Image: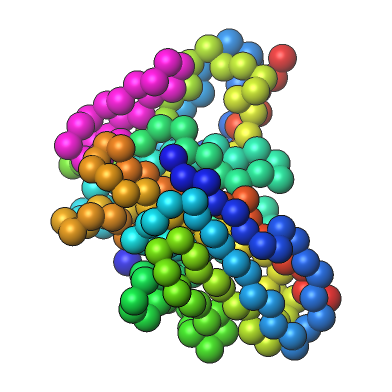
Amino acid sequence: SAVISQKPSRDICQRGTSLTIQCQVDSQVTMMFWYRQQPGQSLTLIATANQGSEATYESGFVIDKFPISRPNLTFSTLTVSNMSPEDSSIYLCSVWTSGRAPYNEQFFGPGTRLTVL
Amino acid sequence: GENVEQHPSTLSVQEGDSAVIKCTYSDSASNYFPWYKQELGKRPQLIIDIRSNVGEKKDQRIAVTLNKTAKHFSLHITETQPEDSAVYFCAASTTLLRGGADGLTFGKGTHLIIQP
């Protein structure tokens, strides 16, 4: 398994501002993912962040709104830009652990609970 | 892209009875199917997964079955206990030849309630 931490754990922000969420992993991983979980809903993949390349965004998510950095194999950031109340969600980072099947799997960080007023 | 359907949205069973949650997927390229349990206010936790080269996998009271032809997979929990109460999510993904996998596409979740 992997130990994943996220900062901040929660925040309350004003509309129009931006928040950067950090994700730190205790081991080097190739693939990191960012998900959003809106209140009472399922998880939706925002983007895949690979070190040394641009993040790949899913349909409905754009780089201007959710810029991502991946400076090394243990760290990534997700910025939620120009926030509106509809951005209120839990944002989770996730990693695909290294190794051969069946010993690799996807683990989630504790999440960042964002409330936009 | 992949689409995962999950049923039922809510399932209430008596303690000690079995619970079954069913999912279907649309992309025949998907080959990795995990199940996550999420308790209130906590992160999703992987409870079991199955890859497309096997039809069934069991871990104590939990089992998962996969029918690739029908694009259907199910979670079975036997001898349910109060601590099994949570939201369960199925998901689908494609593992990559170079290692790693695509991100997960999740079902909408099933709220499992264990009645004492």
- Is residue B81 left or right of B74 when viewed as pictured? right
The structure's colour scheme is rainbow
Check the image and report above or below for B104 versus A21: above
Q: Residue at x 71, y 45 (%)?
A: B41
Examine the rendering and report whether any part of residue B20 can be seen: yes
In which quadrant of the rendered view does residue A91 lie? bottom right
x 60%, y 78%: residue:
A79
Residue at 58%, 10% in the rendered image: B16
Give me the residue at 52% from left, 46% from top: A3
Q: Does any portion of residue A90 appear in the rendered image?
A: no
Quick one: quadrant of the C terminus of chain B?
top right
* Above or below, comparing residue A96 to residue A76 in the picture: above
Residue nearest the observer in this picture, A59 or B69: A59
Residue A117: horizontal and vertical position, in percent? 83, 76
Count numbered badges in the picture: 0
Q: Is residue B13 magenta?
A: no
Based on the picture, tell me whether residue B53 belongs to the magenta stretch.
yes
Task: Pick the residue in front: A42 or B43.
Answer: B43
Q: Position of residue A18 (x, y in %)?
A: 69, 82
- Left or right: B74 as drawn, with respect to B77: left
Residue A11 image position (x, y, % from top left): 77, 66
Q: What's drawn in magenta, residue-wise?
A: B50-67
- Res. A55 image quadrant: bottom left
